Image: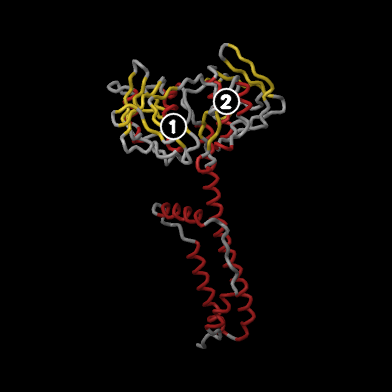
Amino acid sequence: MRKSEWSDNQLEEWIKQLPKVKDPRDPRDIYQNISIQINKSRRVNWIIPSFATAAALLVFFLLVPTFLNDSSNEDKSSVGESTASMDKTMKNSLDKSDMRKAESINFDSTQKDSLNTADTVNEGTTVNEEDLKNKELLIYAIPSQDAQVVVPISILVEKNSAKTKFDQFKDNMPKLTEEEWGLSDYYPLNAKLEYKPEHKKLIVDVPNNHQYGTGSGSEIMFQKILSSELLLMNIEKVSLMTDGQQGIEFGNKGKLYELSVTDSGKHGYFFYYPNKMTDKPYLVPSDEQYQTIQDALSAMSLSKEDHDLKASIPKELNIEKIKESDKILTIYLSNNTIIPEGSKALHMIEAILLTAKEFKYRAVKIENAKVSHVGKFNLANEMQVPIAPNKKEISE
């Protein structure tokens, strides 16, 4: 039997001329899909990796010239034809394999995106009346990581007749996962907390080495958090103490002995996206108070870039007029306005409902919306205002 007329160098040069297989997908997508396929292969053993098939074809292709050359020199022309045919076959096999992978990834990705969109659209972020069955609502004021925004976070826990709501408020502070939520790790507070319900007063006693007066940013945020807690927990004033002594020393304002807040509501709700996340915003009340609901809704169509708060009402939503009757706010849209479907439309409606709550309305009706449903909301009906924003879950 004659040896192959192809030298090692010729084979190497020929292999270099094979068409390159390019894969434009993100490596992380490929890794995730391969991981899924590996897990599936534990249950289904008949799946053969496409690269193994391609390798087998390559080995077969390298051996073909040897057998063909052994037969006769007259077969050289057919060898060339066989080479071209095999090259085409191998390329088609790789292409089809990649196509199947791409189709699988696209299907998985599309299906996942579809499910995520459906969950986001239908779920919403607010706490509503039906959520409170056998539950205790706890609301925490949590600063953003850049200390520019205070986000109210709502937690639902099982009611406990042996503990007061304030006791549960303190007990659940260590369970908050603020950083996972894209916010600042702020709780539990470095202070002893005591609530005097008969006086609607909260006593905050910090240690001598507390961190809340070490800089203008930290002391302003600490006071802002306490002021927010006053509003969220129906407390009228906070007595400040340091290691059992009256007052807390702050660098900019000196020693403060008490905080009190009077707030009649009338805030507008805006979107806040932590860490540039865009899938689901937090609904955050403005620092400003507005004279009328119309003023608030108009302001909500403009972003507050200094606080990184985004408009919750798109400029394309043209409100023609509003009407109020029996604590129901009716919003009439102009004829050329269409509410888009999707998660942003859902959160927009939640922001409008929370703002209406600030102005003591119990429900909102949107007329001339052109769509019947946005997520869980039926726009043909009155929509009850929610209890609180930004529902989150914690481990019990």
Q: Could you tell me residue 294's position as x and y percent?
A: 63, 21
Residue 23 occupies which quadrant of the picture?
A: bottom right
Work out which residue is located at the far right of the displayed protein and give it: 336
Q: Could you tell me residue 316's position as x and y percent?
A: 68, 32
> Tag on residue 352?
2
Q: Could you tell me residue 344's position as x and y percent?
A: 58, 34
Is 333 above or below relative to 119? above
The residue closer to the viewer here, 145 or 40, is: 145
Q: Secondary structure at mark 1?
A: loop
Colouring rule applied to residues: secondary structure
Measure how far apart labels 1 and 2 are at the Cα level: 37 Å
Give the residue type that dot 1 points to.
Lys
Residue 97 occupies which quadrant of the picture?
A: bottom right
Label 1 vs 2, first from the N-terminus:
1
Q: Which residue is mark 1?
A: 253
Give the residue type that dot 2 points to.
Ile
Task: Classify residue 157 as left or right of residue 147.
Answer: left
Who's the residue at 47% across and 38% down the image? 147
Work out which residue is located at the far bottom of the displayed protein and give it: 2
- Dot 1, how many residues are within 10 Å of its Cα: few (below 14), some (14-19), or many (20+)? few
Looking at the figure, which quarter contains the C terminus?
Answer: top left
Q: Contact (CB < 8 A) between labels 1 and 2?
A: no
